[in-house]
Amino acid sequence: MGSKVLRWLYWLSLTMAIVLVAYKVYLNFFERDFAAEHAVQVENIEAALAGRTTFRFAVVGNISNSVGIFERKIIPQLNREGYDFVVSAGNAVSSGGEDKYRAIYRTLTRLDMPYLLTFGPQEQSRIGGFRFYDHFGPYHFSFPAGNSRLIFLDSTGTTDFGWQRRWLEEELEEANEANLFLFSAHPLYPVDRPGLFGLDRDYLFPTSDRKQFTNMIERFNVDAVFSANLPRFDFQRHSGTQYVITGGAGGLVINNGHSRYHYVSVSVQDDQIDIEERQLKIAQHPLWRTLESLWFFIHSLFYTDYLNFILLISLFIAIAIWLHKRIFTERDYYPDFDVDPATLRNTPLRIAMFTNNYLPFIGGVPLSIERLRRGLTQLGHTVLIVAPRYPATAATAANENSVVRVRTLLPLGRHREFKLANIFSVRMYREVLRFRPNIIHVHHPFWLGSVGLFLARRLGIPVVYTYHTRLEHYAHYVPLPGPLFRNLVSHAVVRRFANRCDGIIVPTESAEEYLRNIGVRRRVLVQPTGIDIDKYRAVCEETINQLRIKYAPQGERLLISISRLSKEKNIDFLLDAVLKLKENCNQPFRLLIIGEGPEHRRIESRIQRQGLQQVVTLLGAISPEEMPLYCRIGEIFLFASRSETQGMVILEAMAAGMPVVAVRSSGIDDIVDEGFNGFKTPLDITRWCARIQQLLDDSALYQQLSANAESSAANYSIVNFSDNVHRFYANISASRQADRESEE
């Protein structure tokens, strides 16, 4: 079976399941209801038997929504024999589901006489009690019928037994009818061999209350008690009361001496009562009778329980397809060496990038996108960026002609710094379609990233996703309980989105390991974001000296930290460390924190409160063009964030010759080589400060690590970055084209 057929069969099965669930919802909430049906039936029985002392009624048990037996065999016979009414002794439905109640209602409308239902365990199951009450009426009740009284008990315990005993005693004391008939779904006396195989143990009325009810029933000379709950017929007499079990009106019986299809006929003439079992002769030979009963059971299940039946079949089909693909489909886990992306590598591409933030918003993702755009453009490719609109966009973002700005629906974040773009913008879709991209590159697993994935699927082109951000560290921005978002939602969002893409780019090996751990199966390229090495080498020394005099007028050692001022960046740890250094370090120093964010005011307040104004300076946002200059004035780069996938600013700091002292985390671990271009420590202020002080005190060590940092950064040029991404595009596109040809 071809892969296309398997896919169609899988989606058909899934669609069937969804439709069936929707139909279940429709049955429960939208279909026209029937209510208080017993009120109508009791009124009809009372009217039909008014003044009569002679009548006949039938008792059936365990209908279990049977079509083959009850609807097609028993109902026609009851109609022919002309009973005055019919009573179900319990378990008329196979379960208490809404579809089962509606099915039994449709079946009972085929009767030419009134009917009543006893509330049994199957009526109660699957929260069916409230459906019984709504559709038929109370669980226990009584009423006069001619010269007799019919009494119905709730043997399931849904109604308190203590209350029912009191109610029943009052009913029996006040009853002045000649005959008393009682209905209880659970039998009040045990039988010799219960059930089909003698294994049923909970078929009886609850033991703790059974004796009190039987004593009361026999003390008031109840003529007959009818029960169901067993697929058999049984007759007993105790203290003048006849106890009848009838459970052969449907469901599965085995047609032997005990278990057989039947119903009970009750004839009343004055105070004379005749109870007779009426067997159904549905076959002659016992073997054929057994096979036919099994067939009727299967047919009944398929007809009345068809929703669950088809749902089960759909599930089996889906499982079968999955097993077929896992077991019988040959899987090659090695790269396809027959795929030749060489021609695509020499072909200019049109790449559409979708991002939820971009310049002039300053952050790691916008800067990474801008560098990739610039590098791809230099390689001869055309890039279109789809991003939110910001105030004064045209004046602050370069190459605005290659950007589709999408109107903002609403800003998010404490300081409204994040822009939620209008993903329903017709202009956005029109511009992308007009651009005719060969490949779509998305930078977030939601919102505009989802739009990019949608368009790629519609256009039949590959989609590549760059995993920039550890979402679990941004739980404080999401209106969900923090642990729920961190431990479940964030990982599920990334996993589902990444597995729908054709390829994923990650900046570090630890980021790839994370994706594999959460279940991402797609092809992954480990490619750190490139930096413009030449910019950090071409900075004017005179300008550097002027800035150093400005920020370190007394010759203090300058420490630099570049970070967004937000909770996930761990700025408080940085300030705690500075406070400790201030107390213990012999050399004067100043820390310049570059960056802006929603925590600016709180951090500034803390600096003033702890008297750190002479040590810590918040410089705010610095334009990307000025960043090399500010990096070159620093001696040591400090980084406390644990939410990075790469920590691109660390490479920029190294390009400027600054050794790094960082908190160990994913992303950082792949870039900082311990003791070679910097140090990485656990989240421990004492050990972190010790490394900073070691670099401040040991001039030779500092000079060595500074040179190593600059040489390490030289490996991450924008040219290499863009070229490797382009090669990845070509490989993904070639594989996609080969898969399409094999399917055809």
Image (spheres, rainbow, N blue to C red):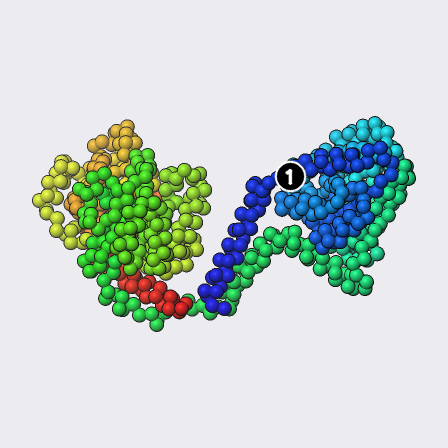
| Residue in the image at 25% along x and 48% along y | 404
Q: Secondary structure at mark 1?
A: loop
Given residues 532 and 23, the one toward you in this image is 23
Residue 82, given in percent of the width and then of the height, sits at 81, 46
Residue at the extreme left of the image, as rendered: 542
| Residue in the image at 17% along x and 38% along y | 556
Residue 46, given in percent of the width and then of the height, sits at 78, 34
| Residue in the image at 52% along x and 62% along y | 321
Binning the other alpha carbons within 10 Å of mark 1 as few (below 14), some (14 to 19) or many (20 upward) gives: few
- Left-right relation of 608 to 325: left
| Residue in the image at 25% along x and 65% along y | 345
- Left-right relation of 182 to 642: right
> What is the number of callouts on the image?
1
- Left-right relation of 388 to 317: left
Q: Is residue 706 visible?
A: no
Figure quadrant of the C terminus: bottom left
Tell me which corner region of the image, top left, top right, bottom left or bottom right, holds residue 164. Answer: top right
Given residues 186 and 576, the one toward you in this image is 186
User: On screen, 35 above or below 647?
Assistant: above
Under mark 1, the amino acid is: Phe
Residue, disc 1: 34
Given residues 127 and 246, the one toward you in this image is 246
Residue at the extreme bottom of the image, as rendered: 338
- Left-right relation of 709 to 491: left
Residue 352, given in percent of the width and then of the height, sits at 28, 54
Q: Is residue 10 visible?
A: yes
Given residues 82 and 122, the one toward you in this image is 82
Residue 100, given in percent of the width and then of the height, sits at 65, 46
